[in-house]
Image (cartoon, grey):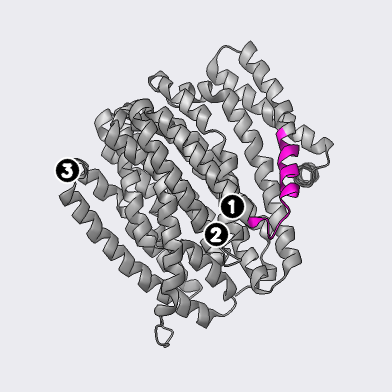
C-alpha cells in the first residue's frame, strides 16, 4: 500500500476533473438527443422517478459515503485494519439497502401516484443496489482515481452507443432510464471484484458494528436533510404540477448541475488529505490546503456562473430545443447556485467532515430544508418551475450563510471574500466578448461556440496577466508538451 505522501494530489485532482468532465460530455451528447425524443413529458417521468428513488438511496447509503472516506483515509496504510473497517461498513450498508427496498415496495403499494410509475421506479432503483456493492467511498479514500476514471469513461461510451441504438421515440423513456442507470452505476459491479486488490473480507476479527452506528446516523440525518431541499423541488413539482413542469425544470437545471459537478470535483479529492492533516493536528497544512480549495472553487465557479447567465437562452435552445423555452428564466434564476452550493459543499464536506463538525453541517442544511419546504409550498402552486427555482436559490443561500458564520472560527472570511471578488471582477471583463458575440452572431449554436471560446480565452489571459498560480502551471504544461512534440518531430 502506498503511503499518503506518495500520492500526488494534483494528479488526483486532474483525474477527478477528467472523470467529471466526461460525466459532463456524456450528458451534453445524450441530453439534447433524449430531450428532443422524449419531450418534456417523457423527460419529466424519468426525472420524477429518479427524484423519488433518491430518497430511498439516501436510506440505503445512510451517511456511509463521507464517513467511509474520512475514516478509511486515516487507516489506509494498515491493510488489516482497513479490511476490518470496510467489512463492517459494507455489512451495515447491505442491511440498510435491504430496508430501503422494503420501504420502496411499501411506498409503491400504498401511494397511488407511485403505482403509475412502478416499472420506471424499479428500473431506477437498481442504482441503490449497485451503489452498495460499488464501495466507491473506499476508492476515494485510497485516492485510486486512475481506476475510477478509466472505468467510468468506458461505461459512458458503451451507454452512448446503447442510447442511439434503443431510444427512438417518446415512449422509450424506460429504455432511457435503464441506460442512464447503466451509465451511472453499471461499473460498480467491477468495483466489488477489483476491491480485493486492497482489502480482504477474511480478517478473522470479531465484527464491531456498534461503534459506527452513531457517526453514520448523524451523517444520515444530514444527508436526508440535504436531500429534502435538493430533490424536494422536483418531487413537489411532480405532485403539484405534473410531468411537463418537471421536464421544463430538468432542462433548466441540467447544465447548472453538470457545471456544479465539475466545480465540486476539484475539491472532492481534498477530503482524504484534509482528514489526514486533521488527524495529525497539522493546522498549518490544513489551513493552507483549505484556502487553496476556496481559490480553485472561485476560479472555476464564478466565470461559469457569469457565462451561463449570458448564454442561457442559447444553451436551452441548442441543447433541448424550442419546446423548452419556458426553461430559460428558471435557468437564469438558478445559475448562482454554482457558486453558492460550491461554497456550502466545500465547507460542509471538505472542512467540517475532517474536523468532526458534522453537526454544524446538519444545522445549516436543516435551515435550508425548512426554508425550501416553506417556499416550495407557497411558490410552486402559483409559479411552477420558476417558483421552485426561486425557492432553491434562497434555500441554498441560507445554507451557505450559516456555514460561513460557523466556519469563522477556523478561517479568515475576509480572505475568502477577496478571493471571490478577484475572480468576479475578472468574470465581468470576460462577459464583454461574450456579450458582443450575442449581439453580432445570430445563429445560436455558432453564438454559443464563439461565446464559450472568447470567454475562456479572455478569462485565461486575465489570469496570466495576474500571474495566477493555476494559469501559470497550465501554461508551463502546454509549453512542455509543445517542446516534447517538437523534439519528437526532429
Residue 379 or residue 208, whichever sits in front: 379
Residue 375 or residue 340, whichever sits in front: 375
Report if residue 148 lies within the magenta region. no
* Residue bearing mark 1: 403
- On the image, the x and y values in percent for residue 168 come to 30, 30
Residue 137 or residue 48, whichever sits in front: 48
How far apart are the two marked residues, 2 and 1, measured between alpha carbons? Answer: 7 Å
* Residue bearing mark 2: 360
Q: Nearer the viewer, mark 2 or mark 3?
A: 2
Q: Are marks 2 and 1 in contact (CB under 8 Å)?
A: yes
Labels 3 and 1: the sequence-earlier one: 3
Q: Which mark is residue 259?
A: none
Q: Is residue 346 left or right of residue 237?
A: right
* Residue bearing mark 3: 112
Q: Secondary structure at mark 2?
A: helix
Q: Which of the image's four quarters has the C terminus?
A: top right
Q: Is residue 94 above or below residue 368?
A: below
Q: Is residue 68 above or below residue 241?
A: below
Q: Nearer the viewer, mark 3 or mark 1?
A: 1
Q: Are marks 3 and 1 in contact (CB under 8 Å)?
A: no
- On the image, the x and y values in percent for residue 412 come to 73, 53
Q: Which of the image's four quarters has the N terminus?
A: bottom right
Labels 2 and 3: the sequence-earlier one: 3
Near mark 1 (Cα within 10 A), the count class, few <14, some 14-19 or many ≥20, is many
Q: Which residues are magenta?
A: 407-424
Q: Quadrant of residue 246?
A: top left
Residue 252 shows up from this direction: yes
Q: Is residue 240 above or below residue 274?
A: above
Amino acid at each position: 500500500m502506498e503511503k499518503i505522501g506518495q500520492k500526488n494530489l494534483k494528479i488526483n485532482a486532474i483525474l477527478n476533473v477528467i472523470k467529471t468532465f466526461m460525466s459532463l460530455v456524456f450528458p451534453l451528447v445524450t441530453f439534447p438527443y433524449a430531450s428532443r425524443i422524449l419531450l418534456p413529458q417523457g423527460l419529466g417521468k424519468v426525472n420524477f422517478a429518479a427524484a423519488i428513488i433518491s430518497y430511498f438511496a439516501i436510506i440505503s447509503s445512510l451517511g456511509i459515503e463521507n464517513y467511509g472516506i474520512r475514516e478509511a483515509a486515516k487507516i489506509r496504510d494498515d491493510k488489516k485494519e482497513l479490511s476490518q473497517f470496510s467489512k463492517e461498513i459494507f455489512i451495515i450498508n447491505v442491511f440498510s439497502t435491504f430496508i430501503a427496498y422494503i420501504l420502496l415496495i411499501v411506498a409503491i403499494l400504498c401511494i397511488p401516484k407511485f403505482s403509475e410509475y412502478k416499472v420506471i421506479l424499479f428500473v431506477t432503483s437498481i442504482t441503490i443496489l449497485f451503489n452498495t456493492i460499488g464501495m466507491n467511498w473506499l476508492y476515494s479514500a485510497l485516492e485510486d482515481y486512475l481506476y475510477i476514471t478509466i472505468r467510468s469513461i468506458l461505461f459512458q461510451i458503451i451507454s452512448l452507443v446503447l442510447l442511439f441504438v434503443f431510444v427512438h421515440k417518446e415512449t422509450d423513456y424506460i429504455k432511457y432510464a435503464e441506460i442512464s442507470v447503466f451509465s451511472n452505476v453499471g461499473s460498480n459491479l467491477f468495483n466489488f471484484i477489483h476491491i480485493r486488490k486492497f482489502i480482504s473480507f477474511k480478517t478473522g476479527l470479531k465484527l464491531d458494528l456498534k461503534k459506527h452506528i452513531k457517526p453514520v446516523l448523524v451523517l444520515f440525518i444530514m444527508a436526508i436533510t440535504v436531500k429534502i431541499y435538493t430533490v424536494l423541488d422536483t418531487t413537489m413539482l411532480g405532485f403539484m404540477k405534473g410531468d411537463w413542469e418537471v421536464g421544463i425544470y430538468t432542462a433548466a437545471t441540467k447544465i447548472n448541475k453538470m457545471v456544479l459537478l465539475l466545480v465540486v470535483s476539484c475539491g472532492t479529492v481534498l477530503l482524504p488529505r484534509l482528514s489526514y492533516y486533521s488527524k495529525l493536528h497539522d493546522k498549518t497544512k490544513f489551513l493552507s490546503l483549505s484556502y487553496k480549495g476556496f481559490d480553485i472553487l472561485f476560479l472555476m465557479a464564478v466565470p461559469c456562473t457569469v457565462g451561463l447567465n449570458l448564454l442561457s437562452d442559447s444553451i436551452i435552445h441548442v441543447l433541448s430545443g424550442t419546446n423548452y423555452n419556458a426553461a430559460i428564466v428558471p435557468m437564469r434564476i438558478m445559475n448562482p447556485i454554482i457558486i453558492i452550493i460550491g461554497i456550502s459543499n466545500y465547507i460542509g464536506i471538505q472542512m467540517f467532515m475532517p474536523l468532526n463538525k458534522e453537526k454544524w453541517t446538519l444545522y445549516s442544511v436543516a435551515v435550508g430544508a425548512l426554508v425550501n419546504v416553506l417556499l416550495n409550498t407557497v411558490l410552486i402552486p402559483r409559479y411552477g418551475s420558476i417558483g421552485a427555482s426561486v425557492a432553491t436559490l434562497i434555500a441554498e443561500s441560507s445554507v451557505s450563510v450559516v456555514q460561513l458564520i460557523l466556519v469563522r472560527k477556523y478561517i479568515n472570511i475576509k480572505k475568502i471574500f477577496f478571493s471571490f471578488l478577484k475572480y468576479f471582477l475578472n468574470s465581468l471583463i470576460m462577459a464583454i466578448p461574450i456579450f458582443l458575440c450575442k449581439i453580432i452572431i445570430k445563429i445560436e449554436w455558432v453564438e454559443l461556440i464563439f461565446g464559450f471560446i472568447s470567454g475562456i480565452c479572455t478569462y485565461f489571459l486575465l489570469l496570466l496577466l495576474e500571474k495566477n498560480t493555476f494559469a501559470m502551471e497550465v501554461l508551463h504544461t502546454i509549453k512542455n508538451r509543445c517542446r516534447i512534440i517538437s523534439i519528437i518531430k526532429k
